[in-house]
Image (cartoon, helix red, strand yellow):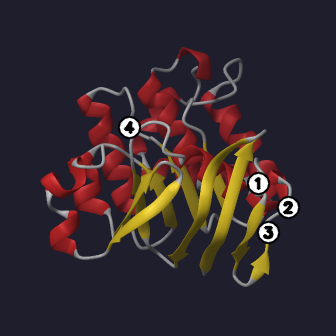
Amino acid sequence: MRLQVEGVNVAYGHAKVLHNVSLQIKQGEQVFIVGRNGAGKTTLLKTIAGFLTPTKGSISFDGQEITRMPPEKISLMGIRYIFQDKRVFTKLTVRENLEIAAYPTGESISDAIDKVVRIYPRIKDFLGAKAGSLSGGQRQILLIGRATIGKPRILLIDEPTEGLAAGVINDIFVLLGKMKGKTSMLIVEQNIPILKKLADRVYIMKEGNLFKEITQKDEIESTEELEKYL
């Protein structure tokens, strides 16, 4: 499995947001993107997921061009985008949210729910609750669980721990840790302790450019090195 982004530019109207961005994600990697607000991190994830179209450059997945594919087709290929705004079907139960995710993948509802319960057993406690009644942390867990249904090959996760309490952040850390090496991930995250423990590589983003890639474990584990870019 390989996701390849090559020389991608993205603009909102006349305002250029991404400038010649290139990166790659290989099978099983957990790769993190860090950078200040407005650096273009969310725009990059939305572009890979098909919600935005580059003005220049290309995106390929396993050698297949996906640059102008619609988001639903990209999702069915196994590239799942988890929005930053914790978007769930609020009027449906947690179980119904999982059922809806299962339908287009062809995975049975029982298998889908069993899979999510295996990676996060406590979700059993609120399967019957309306998703709109969940805390922000519970919604984030639901979104990550929902994205694992079917055969996801890469998860694009935007700020999974933003605004959450310490206990829930730890739950998400454990959840992501369980999937490490199994499902590839590209994660926008500002929580340095999580990044230091999970990241295989780190891209630093600034003003729409990916200007540095950190691959050495000692650099990833250096709080001072990472804080320079937050």
Lower sequence index among marks 2 and 1: 1
Q: Determine contact: label 2, label 4, CB under 8 Å.
A: no
Residue under the image location 31 percent in, 51 percent down: 174
132 vs 225, nearest the viewer: 225
Task: Indicate whether 46 appears above or below 74.
Answer: above
Q: Which residue is mark 1?
A: 50
Q: Residue furthest front?
A: 14
196 vs 212, nearest the viewer: 212
Q: Which residue is mark 4?
A: 161
**The residue under label 1 is which amino acid type?**
Gly
Q: Determine contact: label 3, label 2, CB under 8 Å.
A: yes
Secondary structure of residue under mark 1: loop
Label number found at residue 66: 3
Q: Residues within 10 Å of mark 4 (few under 14, many from 20)?
A: many
Lower sequence index among marks 1 and 4: 1
Secondary structure of residue under mark 3: loop
Residue 149 shows in this picture: no
Q: Determine contact: label 2, label 1, CB under 8 Å.
A: yes
Residue under the image location 42 percent in, 46 percent down: 120
Left or right? Give the position of 175 relative to 61.
left
Query: Residue 97 appears at what percent x and percent y?
Result: 68, 35
**The residue under label 3 is which amino acid type?**
Ile
